[in-house]
Amino acid sequence: MPENLDTSAAAGGGVEPLPSSAMATAYWIAIYRSISDLDRHAQYARIAGPAIAAAGGRFLARSSEFTSLSPDSAVRVVLIEFPSHEAALQTYRSDEYQRACAVLGDAVERDVRIVTALD
């Protein structure tokens, strides 16, 4: 199967072509369902922020003020722009970002996605 097809469950198990440009902008979307330890979340942010910035990540939104149009329990949404899908993925997998995640531990419940922009 070609590498540019998304067959994830989130895509309904179907096949959806991904943008062809390896350098297309990508967005890291984190939806927090709960934050049980604000101190650990702040420690995470102090480590994660520089790791994200070093890879060209730019915070577009990070707030607890949003409108949800579907029933969910989200308490915070973060949107970060990266120069490419690969840059976002490498950041997530980096030692520095994983160190931030280790500090965060089970202090939050969240979903994190990397989405490639359309050409």
Image (cartoon, rainbow, N blue to C red):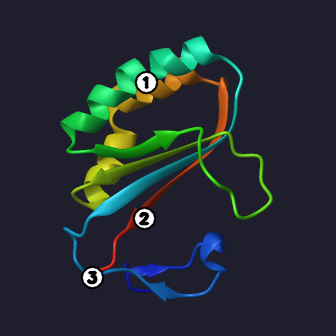
Between discs 3 and 2, the one toward the N terminus: 3
**Front one among 78 and 85:** 78
Query: Foreground residue, 75 or 100?
Result: 75
Badge 3 marks a residue whose secondary structure is: loop
Q: Is residue 46 left or right of residue 12?
A: left
Above-or-below relation of 6 to 26: below
Q: Quadrant of residue 95?
A: top left
Furthest residue in direction right, as rendered: 71
Instruction: Find numbered disc 2 in the image and state the secondary structure of the residue it sits on.
Output: strand
Image location of residue 13, percent across then percent down: 65, 81
Q: Give the vertical position of 30 relative to 22 (above or below).
A: above
Q: Earlier in the sequence, mark 1 or mark 3?
A: 3
Residue with the mark numbered 1: 45
Quadrant of the frame with the N terminus: bottom left
Instruction: Identify residue for label 2.
Output: 115
Disc 2/disc 1 C-alpha distance (Å)? 21 Å
Q: In the rendered image, which residue does mark 3 sit on? A: 20
How dense is the environment of label 3, judged by Cα within 10 Å: few (below 14), some, or many (20 and up)?
few
Q: Give the residue displayed 21% in from the left and 57% down from the top.
A: 83
Query: Which of pointers 2 and 1 lies earlier in the amino acid sequence?
Result: 1
Q: Residue at x 22, y 77 (%)?
A: 21
Tell me the CA gap for discs 1 and 3: 32 Å
Query: Relative to residue 68, is residue 116 depicted above or below?
Result: below
Residue kind at label 2, given as amino acid type: Val
Residue 42's x, y, as percent? 49, 17
